[in-house]
Image: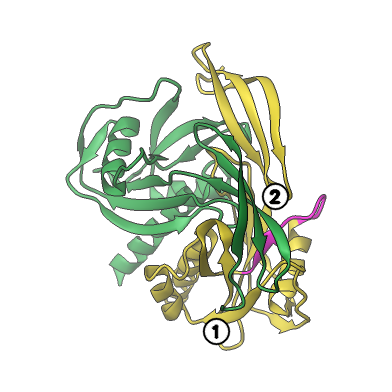
Chain colours: A green, B yellow
Amino acid sequence: MDGLTETKKRSKEIFKGRIVHLFLDEVELPNGKSSTREVVKHPGAVAIIAVNKEGKLLLVRQYRYPLDQVIYEIPAGKLEPHEDPDDSAMRELEEETGYRCKKMEKVASFYSSPGFSDELLHVYFTDTLIEGKQHLDPDEFLELSSATVAEAEKMVAEHQIYDAKSVYAVQFLKLRALQAKK
Amino acid sequence: MDGLTETKKRSKEIFKGRIVHLFLDEVELPNGKSSTREVVKHPGAVAIIAVNKEGKLLLVRQYRYPLDQVIYEIPAGKLEPHEDPDDSAMRELEEETGYRCKKMEKVASFYSSPGFSDELLHVYFTDTLIEGKQHLDPDEFLELSSATVAEAEKMVAEHQIYDAKSVYAVQFLKLRALQAKK
């Protein structure tokens, strides 16, 4: 034992929805005591940092019900069952933006909120967009937009870009621009 | 109407735990149709990018039950009810690392996973650490660690640093170093 690991004793399914699969588990702590852990199981997701011919970052403007707010995000979506993240990223890019791309590279993977969820986000970058066809899910409503890095930075400061993956994306592009200058 | 906003029709509480407060809501979509939204309400959290006298980033090594994995993260914690994020950041820094600081500045706020949760994360930066006293919660087990920016970058690549706020933190420090060189 490393003095950190917790051991599952019992697991109880609380709710299974379209996105959220909630469990309440009883665990043994490193000191032998018991505690409970709430876990939201999630299929994982992909997000795409897509830069167009004009050098602008593609954004989707979307109402987010949990925030009761319209925000700008980079294109993203949940993984389908057994779907490879690389395929999912290609699919989501075209579905949400109407663009495909010649190639994309994975630039990061990270857990959104490891304290209570196993949602793992795979982030891709592409600047080789080509025309495709937008086709949204029946209950998906969004508007396509784009911004220069300077504009996107301002949008972060003003909380129009306001989620982890998209804030990461803006930072990624800033860093890329600075490194290119070296 | 902006063609994007959804309207709450009914809200049903599914579960109220220590962290996760889950609701299943019925909404009216922009096209007038109905759908459901799963929402995990969360008190919000703070995270601290803390750089010590040696120029190293403070990290906490911690088992994350949802991932069944020990990872390195920047110090962080949930907001207490009615707590100001600035106070919370000072509190969490000392509780988890045993350091206080002379001053810290907020560098970003972002939602962890706006598709299903309202968890808002406030990220702070400090490089003015002073001695304090570590005092962990009874069911909190972690080890203090630190890394140079180059080491931290490697840890991101190797998925030892593997969550959104900590990956953001490493990027933030890289960007800061590059901008200082200009």
Locate residue B151 relative to residue B75 in the image: left or right: left
Q: Determine the secondary structure under disc 1.
A: loop
Query: For the magenta stretch, what is the residue range?
Result: B75-84
Amino acid at dot 1: Gly
Locate residue A131 relative to residue A172 in the image: left or right: left
Residue at far right of view: B82
Q: Position of residue A115 (x, y in %)?
A: 60, 57
Disc marking residue B55: 1
Residue A37 covered by magenta stretch: no
**Residue B105, image quadrant:** bottom right
What residue sits 44% from the left and 44% below the top?
Answer: A43
Q: Position of residue B130 (x, y in %)?
A: 73, 83
Amino acid at dot 2: Ile
Disc marking residue A165: none
Structural crowding at the residue carrying mark 2, measured as other residues with C-alpha within 10 Å and reported as few (<14), some (14–19) or many (≥20): some
Disc marking residue B19: 2
